[in-house]
Amino acid sequence: MAKTQNANKANAVPDDISRAILAAHRIALAGHVTPDADCLGSMGALALGLKDLGKSVRVAMPAGSVSRRLSYLTDLFDLQPATTSQLQACDLLIGLDTAKDRRLNIDGKLDALPGIPVLNVDHHATNTRFGKWNWVDPQASSVCELVVDLVAALGCPLTPTMATLLYAGIHGDTQGFSLGNTSTKSLAAAHALAASGARIPEVCEKLQRSHSRSEFDLLKVIYGNARVSADGRLAWSTASHEEITAAGCVAEDIDNQVEIPRSVEGIRVAILFTEGVPGKIRMNFRGERGAAVLELAREFGGGGHPTSAGAILDGSIAAVTEQVLAKARAFVAELSR
């Protein structure tokens, strides 16, 4: 597979990426399983931009993929999920915000789309470069930040709806520009999106202040189960399948609740253990003040970003929590104060 190199200029779109997209006629878009705001925002904005260029666009989105809260974003670009036969009729697949091909949110994964070349646009440090073309920039705050430059390179007019979708993704992945991945580039992109009509108060309300009663009940579970280590540097919480369903939620509703243990003053590492599917324990790792939790996630077959990573293990939530916390305590003990 070709290994497209990043240009020296931050976020500059490699020429072969633009050429591949402009040469295609029927384009499929796919993000990662359990899509977040960055994934949905980049898919939505690119879908609208490509349609403006006269491209036929299909979006892979299996039923039940999107949480209620983030369905706001799919409504903005009027998502019509594609059938497998519609995806198979495409001559290019663009994977967005997805580090590994097995994480693509496609029924049957790439085996279901034989012969279709893949263009991979991502910002995960652990990206496997699974595309024929690969534009991977781990320095970017989000894929939406990259897509701001991509739609400009393609000559797509940036509409207020596209700007709103892209702003939502940058806002989501930087936690409202509060994380270490916030950069002059991400702030400049947000400024450009605001100037293009991004509906910023709407985005903030929908992403931060629009919990349903069931989502609010799940937050209470996460708060109630939160624990902090004796040294105050490791915090975690759990939600079993029974607790998630009792709150009226499903696996797709597990999003950024890891921010609850992460919010404890003085912690270096936060972990959220959730059992959205019985026997499958998803772990969200977050590092504060440069704690490289990606190293920890990799011990369990996971991946992600240096300070924001994840993994999934089979087992009971009690057993997995005990196993991972043992490693996490050792990891935190090695961190400088």
Image: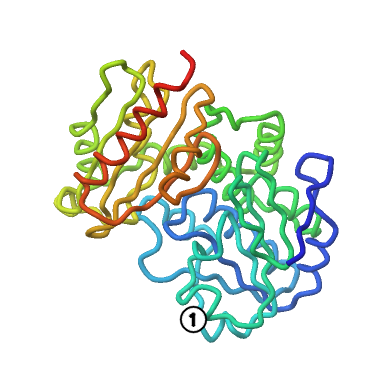
Closer to the camera in the image, 163 or 294: 294
Residue 248: percent from left, percent from top: 19, 53
**Residue drawn at (61%, 63%), measured in percent from left and top?**
95
Closer to the camera in the image, 1 or 74: 1
Residue 93: percent from left, percent from top: 64, 71
| Colouring convention used in this rendered image of the protein | rainbow
Circle 1 — which element?
A: loop
Seen as rendered, the residue at the extreme top is 337
Callout 1: 10 Å neighbours few (<14), some, many (20+)? some
Closer to the camera in the image, 253 or 139: 139
Question: In the rendered view, would you say 2 is above or below 166?
Answer: below
Residue 173: percent from left, percent from top: 53, 40
Residue under label 1: 83
Closer to the camera in the image, 32 or 61: 32
Question: In the rendered view, would you say 77 is above or below 88?
Answer: above
Q: Amino acid at mark 1?
A: Thr
Question: In the rendered view, would you say 178 is above or below 139?
Answer: above
Left or right of 121, for residue 18: right
Residue 192: percent from left, percent from top: 71, 39
**Residue 278 sits in quarter:** bottom left
**Residue 191 sits in quarter:** top right
Total residue callouts: 1
Left or right of 33, for residue 140: right
**Residue drawn at (40%, 28%), measured in percent from left and top?**
269
**Residue drawn at (20%, 42%), measured in percent from left and top?**
217
Is the N terminus in the top left, top right, bottom left or bottom right quadrant? bottom right
